């Protein structure tokens, strides 16, 4: 089994573990008292609808095929770039869907962080939420074969486990949470 694993939660988006199914995705941070999932969906882009089909594509497809058969690859590439590629050149900005936050409490860590506090935390650095003591046996991993993100740790003597994945056929993200002594 191919696996990425870490011994600390992700401090920022670049260190989070990715999940996705081709049309929805999540970055999984793996925090202890507060875990964060940054979610997105392929239907969320800046701007409105844009028809990107090149109107010259149909009439030039046979030309490109002929040039390829004749092994005139440079010419085929030029015609392809000018007439088959989508318009306009470039993409609109991909927009985030939302942030999902999961919080846990223990007798030693009873305080929840409000969504407002979580959203506006300076630079969104998740390490600021991590307890300075009481955490042991931490492990955050992504099975690249299964597409499952796993987080496990002990906080104040209580064992916690989370598994998350994004299903292609069901078009949902699932998160399984376990905690107990």
Image (cartoon, rainbow, N blue to C red):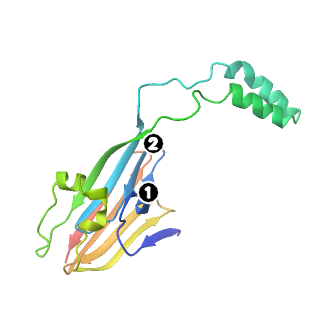
Looking at the picture, does residue 145 appear above or below residue 61?
below
Q: Residues within 10 Å of mark 2 (few under 14, many from 20)?
A: few
Q: Which residue corresponds to the image point at 45% horizontal and 38% vertical from the top-left? A: 93
Labelled disc at residue 18: 1
Q: How crowded is mark 1: few (under 14 residues within 10 Å), some or many (20 or more)?
A: many
Spot occupied by residue 17 in the image (x, y as percentages of width and height): 42, 61
**Front-most of residues 53 and 168:** 53
**Front-most of residues 121 and 65:** 121
Looking at the picture, does residue 164 appear above or below residue 62?
below
Spot occupied by residue 105 in the image (x, y as percentages of width and height): 15, 68
Question: Residue most toward the front?
Answer: 122
Instruction: Look at the image and tell me whether residue 172 can be seen.
Output: no
Q: Which residue corresponds to the image point at 76% horizontal and 34% vertical from the top-left? A: 77
- Left or right: residue 76 compared with residue 122: right
- Left or right: residue 51 compared with residue 10: right
The quadrant in which the C terminus is found is bottom left
Spot occupied by residue 125 in the image (x, y as percentages of width and height): 31, 61
Labelled disc at residue 23: 2
Mark 1 secondary-structure assignment? strand
Query: Does the CB distance between marks 1 and 2 fall below 8 Å?
Result: no
Question: Residue most toward the right?
Answer: 70
Spot occupied by residue 141 in the image (x, y as percentages of width and height): 42, 68
Instruction: Look at the image and tell me whether residue 98 can be seen.
Output: yes
Mark 2 secondary-structure assignment? loop
Q: Which residue corresponds to the image point at 52% horizontal and 35% vertical from the top-left? A: 91
């Amino acid at each position: 089994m191919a696996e990425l694993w870490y011994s600390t939660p992700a401090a920022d988006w670049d260190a989070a573990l990715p999940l996705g199914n081709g049309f929805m995705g999540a970055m999984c941070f793996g925090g202890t008292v507060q875990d964060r999932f940054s979610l997105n969906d392929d239907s969320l882009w800046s701007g409105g609808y844009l028809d990107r089909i090149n109107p010259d594509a149909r009439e030039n497809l046979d030309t490109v095929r002929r040039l390829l058969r004749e092994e005139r690859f440079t010419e085929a590439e030029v015609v392809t770039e000018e007439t088959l590629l989508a318009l306009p050149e470039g993409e609109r900005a991909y927009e985030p869907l939302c942030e999902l936050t999961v919080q846990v409490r223990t007798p030693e860590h009873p305080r929840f962080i409000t969504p407002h506090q979580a959203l506006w935390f300076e630079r969104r650095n998740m390490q600021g939420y991590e307890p300075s003591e009481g955490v042991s046996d931490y492990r955050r991993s992504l099975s690249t074969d299964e597409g499952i993100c796993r987080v496990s740790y002990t906080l104040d003597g209580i064992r916690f486990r989370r598994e998350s994945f994004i299903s292609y056929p069901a078009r949902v993200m699932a998160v399984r949470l376990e905690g107990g002594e």
